[in-house]
Amino acid sequence: MVETHPERFGQEFWTFFTTRIGSHLPPRPVMIDLGCGPGLLLRDLGGRHPGATLYGYDVTPAMIAYGQQLSYGAAKATLALHDVATQPLPHAPGSVDLVTMSSVLHVFDEPLPALAEIRRTLAPGGIFLLHDWLRQPLSTYLAWRRDVLKEGEAESRRRGFRLFPVHNKYTTEDWRWLLAQAGFAICDEAQLRASHRIFVTTPAR
């Protein structure tokens, strides 16, 4: 996850983020990253929004421990163990300006309760950024593991066959349907990588 961060959140992502999301945030935004892993996305957000208050939640103690050692610049950061799939978020309704979720929601057995909880916390005009896997052909997925992750042929097939059903659950239309069912309106979307799609959403009126 640490090694692939630059590929997942490169210049193209941040250009998209700055123009489509960052320019719409208040000067001192409250931001949450769900499934924050080692905290690298939060670190990058803090560097771009020094007035932000950042919260990162993950279910893996080692990831939280890693993230707690990072510098978030002038931004205030809190990282904690929390399972959004089973627990409500410790935030008041309408108190959060941005929620991000990258490559996490696809693992949930039932994503709608988590989406409802995200919607509850968002302030009027708040933004939910979903960045997640798209269904793709097996051959394309295995080639991505080999060419982008630099896995050897044997490893890419061994790991690829195991992870293919997990990473390739949802189509673009599936994600749109889930977001609509949870009460989100899609403001923008983009596919910056063959494997992932970004949805910029806000609570529907």
Image (cartoon, rainbow, N blue to C red):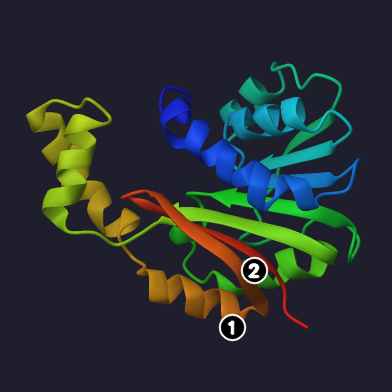
Q: Is residue 168 left or right of residue 104?
A: left
Q: Residue at x 59, y 83 (%)?
A: 181
- Quadrant for the C terminus in the image: bottom right
Q: Percent x, y for residue 114? A: 64, 66
Residue 174, by quadrant, is bottom left
Residue 121, by quadrant, is bottom right
Q: Residue at x 62, y 34 (%)?
A: 41
Count of numbered tags: 2
Q: Residue at label 1?
A: 181
Work out whether residue 1 can be spotted.
no
Q: Return the disc, 1 or 2, that comes first in the chain's sequence.
A: 2
Q: Is residue 75 left or right of residue 63?
A: right
Q: Percent x, y for residue 144? A: 22, 40
Q: Is residue 26 left or right of residue 81?
A: right
- SS for tag 1? helix
Q: Residue at x 33, y 54 (%)?
A: 167
How far apart are labels 1 and 2 at the CA level? 9 Å
Q: Residue at x 62, y 55 (%)?
A: 129
Query: Which three-letter amino acid code belongs to the residue tagged 1?
Result: Gln
Query: Which three-letter amino acid code belongs to the residue tagged 2?
Result: Leu
Q: Nearer the viewer, residue 19 or 42?
A: 19
Task: Please determine whether, in this image, residue 201 is positioned above or below residue 112.
Answer: above
| Callout 1–callout 2 Cβ contact below 8 Å | yes
Task: Please determine whether, in this image, residue 81 is positioned above or below residue 152.
Answer: below
Q: Is residue 204 left or right of residue 103?
A: right
Which label is found at residue 115? 2
Residue 22, by quadrant, is top right
Which label is found at residue 40? none
Q: Nearer the viewer, residue 150 or 202?
A: 202
- SS for tag 2? helix
- Quadrant for the N terminus in the image: top left
